[in-house]
Image (cartoon, rainbow, N blue to C red):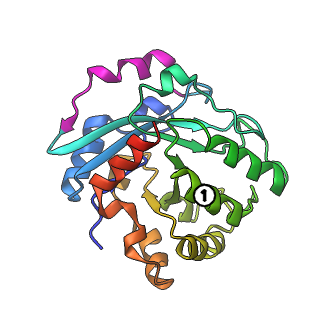
Amino acid sequence: MQIKLDAHTHTLASGHAYSTILENAQFAAERGLSVLAITEHAPCMSDAPPLSYFYDYARLDKELYGVEMLYGVELDIMDYHGKLSMEQRVLDRMDIGIASFHEVICPRGSRAENTRAFLGAMQTPGVSIIGHPDDGNIPVDYEALVLEAKRSGVLLEMNNSSFDPWHYRQNVRENYRTLLPLCETHGVMIVLGSDAHFASAVGGFDSALALIEELSFPKELVINTDPVRFKEILAKRK
């Protein structure tokens, strides 16, 4: 399977990441990617960039080292109804929007509350990906999530960094073993995201790809092989 894009990366602008846009782009080029998304944390995260940073994305090159660059945001889900951490007028300016649950922003709820939060976030224009829906600390009704992804056209992320042994997310592998077969059954696309916080992780999907191979998950449901179709999905979610 030829991976051509990374949909989820951070730079030092996110505060707890360590590389620049140029460094991320260089690693993307070296790994043969044709599209790279920079998705900084939204301002409500304590060390995230201010709103003005996102307005100034227009200053940035749309191609670096031969890699097409997309500039966007990883939004925080703020409550159990799916309220997000950026005003629509700013989100409308982004190339890509990922909606994620971070417990430092919204405490974990019940399975029903967490599911409602994700489903609510998927109704917001500009949200094209649900980020790392894999943490056993935040239980989710995966069938409900997959069915809404099918209806709305939102992509579900398989987050490679979640597999790291140091990560705080729990039961990640087991949760993807539940989620991926449901995606296959309902014909729902997934997107691989490195969630890179250092340039050398850009385009790194070894753990995610190993599980995809183990489960014989259909390669045609992995959007990272088709940048054109990926950008079409982003456009439809505007």
> Label 1's element?
loop
Is residue 98 found left or right of 70 in the rendered image?
right
Single out the residue that lies furthest toward the right.
110
Residue 156: name its quadrant: bottom right
The C terminus lies in which quarter of the figure?
Answer: top left
Q: Amino acid at mark 1?
A: His
Please provide the residue range marked out in magenta. Answer: 48-63
Outermost residue to the front: 151
- List x then y, in percent, for residue 31: 23, 59
Image point (50%, 18%), residue name = 51
Percent coordinates x, y for residue 73 in the rendering: 47, 35
Q: Is residue 49 visible?
A: no
Q: Residue at x 65, y 74 (%)?
A: 178
- In the rendered image, the vertical position of residue 119 relative to residue 56, given as above or below: below
**Residue located 23% across and 43% down the image:** 68
Decide: is 120 above or below 51: below
Check disc 1 and report the residue beneath it: 167
The reply, left or right, for residue 190 in relation to residue 11 is right
Of the 4 image quadrants, the one containing the N terminus is bottom left
Q: Does 59 appear in magenta?
A: yes
Decide: is 211 above or below 62. below
Residue 17 vs residue 158, the one in the foreground = 158
The percent position of residue 141, horizontal first and vertical second, equals 74, 62
Point out the residue furthest to the left here. Answer: 66
x, y percent for residue 213 = 43, 81
